[in-house]
């Protein structure tokens, strides 16, 4: 297997150094380095889905009726999602408190006035340079206060009409629906006696003040959504192409922004640990060239499979050049741990039952029944149950939960095609407990295999002569400078990687989790690819410094 995993395509456009420097400074003043890093780790086919807050853009409009449900202002069936119900109750408390303040202060609409002013400020922020249009959006507290003495809704209608002109076309239907409803509410407002209170006919049976407060909050939510759309539009049309054309400059400037003193002690310590590990493994297959060692010993052994289970401690040891990848590394580490334990449970079950482990390598059994036998369907179902049980039931290390017990025994019964004997059940559960405590020989074997799997995949090289790769060593005078390259990873290449990784995973005994760990390995591969493509000069310099220091002793 070739040593370099880096899949790099030549830069096709040269930007003026002064212009690009100014553009990078401008982008980094508005977009944090974490977003730049995320852009560079995203496959080409997924770039169109990148958003500022990393949440997918809603595919449908957010209507007022749903807003009232989400905020507990109209009843809806209770869900089993307790955090969601608590959040809804807390949001409703805000409107209840505002209504109470209004009623207890002689119907003084100050809470609504503040909400409308905040809404109008949000609308002005959408067009900061069009000060000529700001006057069309009411903002003067005195004028708003006078208008609201007769009716709550005209200022809200004016704000909604302004918002509708600023929204993207696929968002306006919800705003227009609210405008149509509010026009009816506005025309049906009547005063209550000689007081300042109003009533209005509305299908939600809400008090006029509560309805107006909810409307102000709803329109503010839509304005914030519009603001996100503007940010994401700029991100897609300007930032993403610029970053992809100049990855090295952006990543290095981002690192300098986070560490302005230019000192990277954790990275230096990391390279030193890699050098020590490489020297200890000099006679084994683990040791390779420096780039191999950074990827296999540095990322896989030292970080991904760190002996420490303390995430905070691991973060302290993380080199500065990989700090933006902490969350991904933690997630991959968790996938690897679950895969080792879950696969160990499945393999041990097969061994206890005297069934070959090849039964776990296919989703279809008993092919003489055209893949539709009850046995094959049942086994697939029990596989899924075990995966879910492992994901939910291993928060306490070594705990054999009831859910995991049930899932393991159900899988064993499906494989056995008949009820288990008490002795077999006891043996399977005892072995399962040992696996979850990491003391069973099978789990230790698979843990070793998992390390080997990631070491192999992190230096994966596509079998495609048309894909240029970074040479094993990057030195001065090289024909293709790192600052003029950008990683180019498309879906076909991702599919090729995942397919190869799944095949290797199944051969190593991870059939249950083959796809999950293949995708995880792809994430780690991309991190390694970006690291050596951007920071190899610095890393190699640290290797040389450490070697010189050792030589001078």
Image (tube, rainbow, N blue to C red):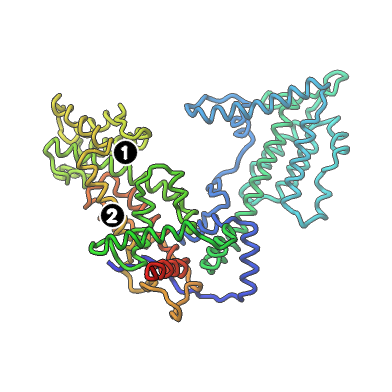
Which residue in the protein does label 2 denote? 453
Residue 257 coordinates in the image, percent (x, y):
59, 60
Tell me the residue at 42%/65% (across/down): 532
Q: Is residue 366 above or below residue 254?
A: above
Please tell me how crowded label 1 is: few (under 14), some (14-19), or many (20+) other residues with Cα within 10 Å: some
Marks 2 and 1, how far apart in space? 20 Å
225 or 450, which is in the foreground? Answer: 450
Q: Is residue 538 above or below residue 69?
A: below
Which quarter of the image is occupied by the C terminus?
Answer: bottom left
59 or 341, which is in the foreground? Answer: 341
Please tell me how crowded label 2 is: few (under 14), some (14-19), or many (20+) other residues with Cα within 10 Å: some
Closer to the N terminus: mark 2 or mark 1?
1
Question: Visible in this render: residue 46?
Answer: no
Secondary structure type for disc 2: helix
Give the mark toward the camera: 2 or 1: 2
Label annotation for residue 387: 1
Tell me the residue at 30%/46% (across/down): 513
Cβ–Cβ below 8 Å for labels 2 and 1? no
Question: Visible in this render: residue 538?
Answer: yes
Which quarter of the image is occupied by the N terminus?
Answer: bottom left
Q: Is residue 291 above or below residue 139?
A: below
Residue 94 coordinates in the image, percent (x, y):
67, 28
């Amino acid at each position: 297997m070739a040593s370099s995993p880096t899949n790099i395509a030549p830069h096709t456009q040269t930007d003026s150094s002064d212009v690009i420097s100014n553009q990078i400074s401008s982008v980094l003043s508005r977009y944090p380095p974490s977003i730049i890093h995320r852009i560079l780790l995203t496959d080409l086919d997924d770039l169109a889905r990148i958003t500022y807050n990393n949440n997918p853009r809603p595919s449908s409009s957010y209507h007022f009726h749903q807003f009232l449900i989400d905020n507990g202002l109209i009843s809806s069936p209770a869900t089993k999602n307790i955090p969601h119900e608590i959040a809804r109750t807390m949001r409703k408390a805000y409107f209840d408190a505002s209504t109470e303040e209004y009623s207890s202060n002689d119907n003084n609409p100050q809470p609504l006035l503040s909400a409308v002013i905040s809404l109008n400020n949000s609308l002005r922020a959408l067009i900061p340079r069009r000060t000529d249009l700001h006057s069309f959006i009411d903002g003067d507290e005195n004028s708003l206060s006078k208008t609201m003495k007769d009716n709550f809704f005209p200022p809200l209608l004016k704000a909604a009409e302004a918002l509708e002109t600023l929204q993207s076309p696929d968002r306006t239907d919800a705003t227009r629906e609210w405008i149509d409803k509010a026009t009816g509410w506005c025309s049906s407002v009547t005063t209550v006696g000689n007081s300042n209170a109003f009533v209005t006919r509305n299908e939600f049976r809400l008090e006029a003040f509560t309805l107006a407060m909810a409307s102000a909050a709803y329109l503010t939510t839509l304005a914030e959504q519009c603001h996100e759309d503007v940010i994401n539009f700029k991100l897609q049309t300007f930032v993403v192409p610029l970053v992809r054309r100049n990855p090295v400059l952006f990543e290095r400037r981002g690192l300098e922004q986070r560490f302005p003193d230019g000192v990277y002690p954790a990275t230096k310590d990391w390279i030193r640990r890699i050098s020590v590990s490489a020297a200890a493994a000099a006679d084994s297959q683990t040791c390779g060239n420096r780039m191999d060692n950074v990827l296999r010993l540095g990322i896989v052994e030292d970080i991904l499979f760190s002996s420490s289970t303390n995430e905070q401690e691991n973060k302290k040891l993380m080199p500065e050049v990989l700090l933006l990848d902490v969350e991904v590394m933690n997630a991959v580490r968790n996938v690897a741990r679950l895969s080792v334990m879950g696969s160990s449970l499945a393999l041990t079950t097969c061994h206890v039952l005297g069934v070959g482990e090849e039964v776990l390598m296919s989703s279809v059994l008993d092919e003489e029944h055209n893949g539709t036998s009850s046995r094959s369907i049942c086994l697939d179902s029990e596989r899924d149950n075990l995966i879910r049980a492992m994901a939910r039931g291993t928060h306490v290390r070594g705990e054999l939960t009831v859910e995991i017990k049930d899932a393991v025994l159900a899988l064993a019964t499906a494989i056995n095609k008949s009820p288990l004997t008490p002795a077999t059940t006891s043996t399977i559960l005892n072995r399962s407990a040992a696996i979850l405590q990491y003391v069973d020989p099978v789990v230790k074997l698979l843990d070793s295999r998992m390390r080997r799997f990631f070491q192999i995949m992190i230096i994966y090289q596509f079998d495609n002569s048309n894909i240029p790769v970074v040479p094993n060593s990057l030195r001065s005078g090289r024909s293709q400078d790192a600052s003029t390259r950008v990683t180019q990873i498309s879906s076909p290449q991702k599919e090729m990687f995942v397919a190869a990784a799944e095949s290797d995973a199944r051969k190593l005994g991870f059939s249950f989790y083959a796809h999950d760990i293949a995708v995880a390995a792809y994430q780690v591969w991309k991190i390694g690819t970006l690291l050596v493509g951007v920071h190899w000069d610095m890393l190699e310099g640290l290797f040389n410094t450490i070697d010189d220091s050792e030589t001078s002793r």
